[in-house]
Image: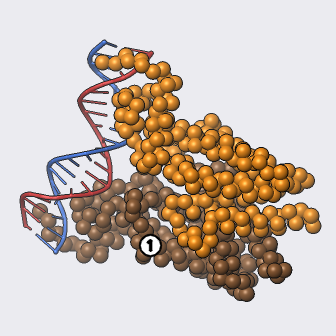
Chain colours: A brown, B orange, C blue, D red
DNA sequence: ACCTGAACACCGTTCAAGT
DNA sequence: ACCTGAACACCGTTCAAGT
């Protein structure tokens, strides 16, 4: 057998990534298996290993796609608000909405763990960095005179916090939303944190 | 064969949980398998299924143990500071220290996902609730006149944020700690959030 | 060069059969 | 009643063999 060549290596790769993404969005990351992906694209498991190092590599590509989608939406959100403080809130809310709207895809990004000893490849890390840079830029226009280090500290604090709110909201739903919606938590966080952080700048 | 009865059902259960915990702390949650646990305690896989519904049930028990350990440390931390604002920071720092010191155990708690359609059992949810209650109490003594709802909103916001900082710090290490240590993020979060939140109370 | 099929060492879960 | 061993349907990964 063999020598089908129905598809180029690139086509096969993106078919596999699409298949993985479809499985993730339907069954979650736990549902992804090399055999299932192979079957979905009409090839054998072995073929998959010519395009991907292992199953983690394939999932990583699927997750990178998700990050790109997220980044695109955040970019729009960041550009939509003229008031810089509103922009920060908008970014946070867009992040939450994305997590809610692509629950399994988003969970896959944070549930996936590299095999031990492996490090995140550059092309993946670059997407993550772009995410952080977005909020960092928003804070920079909000407080242009603050030091680089101060901006970074604040943007990482905010980003981690927003992430925490989203992660405890989706999936396991640790607390009932009727008492406090995730939107209310985001609002409280951004409002209070920024209020004090901006004032510190004026008096110091 | 059979009829060993070397151990009571309870002994067998706690042996299995201990074995699972040992595997988690050495290899992470991904390393846990029914066969491996069974082998570690000197029984067959089948025997495990007389004490646990499935492998998720076993992991859940191991995770509950971790939550109890965490809760015990947080209880100590919460009692140690007389200044209520310091107490909040102390709780956050203790949470971070626990996550760092029991990285795989802690990751297991948040990585583990129930099989679809299954809900967290009460005895597990109770431990999670106790965790949240701890911070809620600290905020209540910090701002005794605030409404129940206001306290809950703030404590969930803070809790989620602290969690987010810890989760982005451990494991995948999304940003280098040299620029901003997780302790610095926690401090920034607690200081600024509480500063504004407490002031809002005084002027409103 | 590309692809397959079978193999290897693993999984979770069940259950007849043994004591 | 308790435990085993084998079975079933799955995994990830590799690789000789075919075209």
Residue B69: image quadrant is: top right
Residue A26: image quadrant is: bottom left
Q: Residue B145: x and y, percent?
A: 91, 53
Dot 1 surroundings within 10 Å: few (below 14), some, or many (20 or more)? some
Residue denoted by label 1 = A124
The answer to whether residue B151 shows anywhere in this view is no
Q: Residue A174: x and y, percent?
A: 64, 50
Please report the residue visible at 69 percent of the width from the left and 47 percent of the height from the top. Answer: B74
* A86 w.r.t. A95: above or below: below
Query: What secondary structure is marked by label 1?
Result: helix
Q: Residue A170: x and y, percent?
A: 60, 56
| Position of residue A83 in the picture relative to residue B122 (left or right) | right
Q: Residue B126: x and y, percent?
A: 66, 39
B157 or B198, which is in the foreground?
Answer: B198
Q: Which chain letter goes with mark 1?
A: A
* B162 w.r.t. B82: above or below: below
Give the total of numbered labels.
Answer: 1
Please report the residue visible at 55 percent of the width from the left and 50 percent of the height from the top. Answer: B102
B95 or A85, which is in the foreground?
Answer: B95
Please report the residue visible at 49 percent of the width from the left and 36 percent of the height from the top. Answer: B18
| Position of residue A158 in the picture relative to residue C9 (left or right) | right
| Position of residue A95 in the picture relative to residue B16 (left or right) | right
Quadrant, the C terminus of chain B: bottom right
Please report the residue visible at 53 percent of the width from the left and 53 percent of the height from the top. Answer: B103
Quadrant, the N terminus of chain B: top left
* B53 w.r.t. B117: above or below: above
Residue at the right extreme, as displayed: B203
The answer to whether residue A149 shows anywhere in this view is yes
| Position of residue B71 in the picture relative to residue D11 (left or right) | right
B14 or B184, which is in the foreground?
Answer: B184
């Amino acid at each position: 057998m063999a020598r089908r060549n129905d598809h180029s290596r690139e086509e096969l790769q993106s078919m596999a990534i699409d298949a993985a993404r479809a499985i993730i969005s339907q069954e979650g990351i736990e549902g992804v298996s090399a055999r299932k992906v192979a079957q979905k694209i009409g090839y054998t498991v072995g073929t998959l290993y010519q395009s991907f190092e292992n199953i983690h590599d394939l999932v990583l590509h699927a997750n990178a796609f998700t990050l790109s989608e997220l980044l695109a939406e955040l970019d729009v959100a960041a550009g939509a608000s003229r008031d810089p403080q509103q922009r920060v809130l908008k970014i946070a809310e867009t992040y939450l909405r994305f997590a809610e709207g692509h629950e399994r895809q988003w969970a896959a990004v944070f549930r996936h763990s590299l095999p031990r000893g492996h490090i995140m490849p550059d092309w993946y890390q670059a997407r993550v960095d772009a995410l952080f840079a977005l909020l960092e830029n928003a804070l920079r226009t909000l407080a242009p005179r603050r030091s680089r280090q101060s901006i970074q500290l604040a943007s990482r604090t905010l980003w981690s916090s927003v992430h925490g709110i989203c992660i405890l909201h989706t999936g396991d739903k640790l607390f009932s939303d009727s008492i406090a919606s995730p939107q209310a938590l985001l609002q409280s966080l951004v409002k209070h944190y920024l209020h004090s952080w901006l004032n510190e700048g004026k008096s110091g």
